[in-house]
Amino acid sequence: MSHHIKIQPSGREYDVEDGLTVLKAAIDAGIKLPYGCQNGACGACKGKVVAGEIDHGAAPMGTLPQDQRDQGMALFCCAKPLTDLTIEAKVITAGKDIEIKTMACRVQQIERLADDVISLRLKLPMNERLQFLAGQYIEVLLKDGQRRAFSLANAPYDDEYLQLHLRLIPGGLLTEHVFNHMQERDILRIEGPHGSFFLREDTAKPIILLVGGTGFAPIKSLIEYAIHSKIKRPMQLYWGARNRAGLYLPALPQQWAADHAQISYVPVLSEPADDDAWQGRTGLVHQAVLDDHADLSGYQVYACGAPAMIEAARRDFVARGLPEDEFYADSFTFGAPEANQ
């Protein structure tokens, strides 16, 4: 049995299956209610039940005292509906609506994806969760006060660990340490989420996803979020790299395309090696998009990669009819505050 939830003042609606909390069902439905821990400790998800009945579950009295319960307040990460509900809660629609946190994380797993790419999984503190939008990034805070920014590769619903894709930058202050010295169970301090690179959901336009190298990380988050949220807009992923090794998770986009009719995948190599035995597309990845699309006026584009790729794509896609305000980019620079280094 399920119960129907209406949210005021946004007017959003969704259903909650038996056994799920109001918050978990909202996350599954792609509705972004505020939260910070998902276990009742922080109170960030507190809202009002305007109509209907709930089971407060394990909501701690310290976070939700009895007088607040009597007034209809609830912790939506703990509350389970007993009837249909009307609730009063803020729905997050932009990155600025999410609290930026600073926290210490433990390195849970270090996995080499290619000779020069490592996947890092970070374990959050016991009673903490980092709410973010698919496509956003965090900053790793270094001991000397410097910061290094890395896009989150996991989708928001899959937030037990934070996943980063790091490419080795020769002389890079953090990446040299990660590749040569970091051990599992090391501690990193992070701050986030940051960034305005996230999926705009107020349109049904088809999407072109343009990726260079480890720009795949935020695009992975975005696509997995879209799949989980049952977003059916056509999504065309173009992933460019110098050689085959640069497509460091090749089976994953192939599986997306095989499992979901709305997703297509075009890998492009700019300088395939002889031993790559490459039979696919070659050249510049943004040129592959231009070769496939004579008119981009009806599309949204999400581009992530090196500045030169971003700048060329913006210029050439707009010339091909793409509205300037439908080009969203995350430029991976090195040495600036946004540096993925």
Image (cartoon, grey):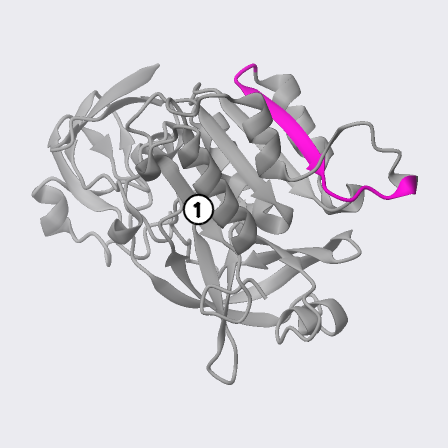
Q: Mark 1 sits on what residue? A: 329
Q: Which amino acid does label 1 sit on?
A: Ala
| Span highlighted in magenta in the image | 261-274
Name the element at disc 1: strand
199 lies above or below 38 = above
Residue 26 locus on image (x, y percent) = 33, 32
Quarter of the rendering occupied by the C terminus: bottom right
Q: Residues within 10 Å of mark 1 (few under 14, many from 20)?
A: many
Rendering quarter of residue 82: top left
The front one of 3 and 256 is: 256
- Residue 130 vs residue 168: left or right? left
The front one of 300 and 125 is: 300
Residue 319 locus on image (x, y percent) = 42, 34
- Residue 52 vs residue 271: left or right? left
Q: Does residue 183 show up?
A: yes
* Residue extending farthest left: 71
The front one of 187 and 16 is: 187
Q: Does residue 157 show up?
A: no
Name which residue lies at 31% across and 49% down: 95
Name which residue lies at 31% across and 38% down: 325
